[in-house]
Amino acid sequence: MLGPKAPWDESNEPILRSPRVVIAFIIVFALVHIGSQFLSARQYDYLIENYALIPSHIAAGAASFWQTLQLGSQFVTYAFLHGDFTHLIFNSVWFLIFATAVARRAGTARFLTLMLLTTLGAALTHLTFHWGEPQPVVGASGAVSGLMGAAFRFIFVNPHAQLTWPPARLPLFSQPVLVTSTVWVVLNVLLGVTGYTPEGFGAAIAWEAHLGGFFTGLLLFPLFDRRRSWIS
């Protein structure tokens, strides 16, 4: 006879029963993008100028305290903007998959903190490679990549094979983590070189941000794992 399910056991949970925080983010992503479609050209330009991540704005600095706050907010708000509905749907689907896994494993508060850090990690990595450039960056891809990196630390473990406490978390240099990480890095470099998107070739892809977010999640996840051990 099976006993009650432990609160940390996220196995066999249908993805349609995703944590509320995950569904809430997807709804916000959708509402922001849909709302942006009703803006005038001037209003939309204002939205991008003030809430997308624009390296040239960051490099120029701020003349006042409020400008500093506004520039600082771009490190987070850019993730809630999307270029078109294809971009929105693609990010939302992958977010649903990996955010669900991480939120179940880490809990809401740790999930939110880790997502914030992956969003910042993606932004900082992009700025490192594109400092001073005027091209705005939008989209949750960096955060999604970060949650993917975090999920790679545990999704390949069979939860029913865990007989000791704490349940297993894959080491950074384990074969599944190394193989999947290598594939993701190579894929992103190829996408960056070719500019391929579902709409065709030649698009500007912030692939460095993807990798920045990915490695932020991959490296920091053990600090946010609800199953963590202070020894391992």
Image: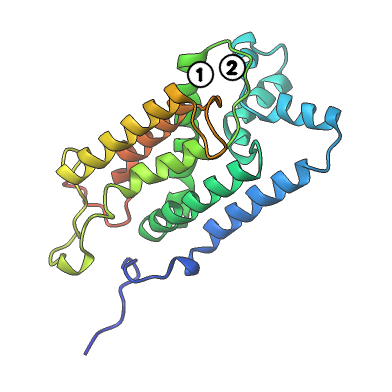
Determine whether 23 is above or below 53 in the image: below
The residue depicted at 58 percent of the width and 49 percent of the height is: 89
Q: Earlier in the sequence, mark 1 or mark 2?
A: 2
State the SS at label 1. Answer: helix
| Residue of label 1 | 127
Q: Is residue 56 left or right of residue 206?
A: right
Q: CA distance from mark 1 to mark 2?
A: 6 Å
Q: Amino acid at mark 2?
A: Pro
The residue depicted at 49 percent of the width and 50 percent of the height is: 95
Q: Is residue 184 left or right of residue 23?
A: left
Disc 2 packing (10 Å; few <14; some 14–19; many ≥20): many
Q: Quadrant of the N terminus?
A: bottom left
Q: Nearer the viewer, residue 116 or 38?
A: 38
Residue 193 image offset from top left, x and y in percent: 43, 22
Callout count: 2
Determine whether 191 is above or below 25 in the image: above
- Asked which quadrant contains residue 162, the reply is bottom left
Q: Nearer the viewer, residue 174 or 105?
A: 174
| Residue of label 2 | 55
Q: Amino acid at mark 1?
A: Leu
Q: Is residue 9 left or right of residue 107?
A: left
Q: Is residue 24 left or right of residue 190?
A: right
Determine whether 5 is above or below 194 in the image: below
Image marks 1 and 2: residues in contact by CB distance under 8 Å: yes
Residue 31 image offset from top left, x and y in percent: 71, 51
The residue depicted at 38 percent of the width and 36 percent of the height is: 214
Residue 232 image offset from top left, x and y in percent: 16, 46
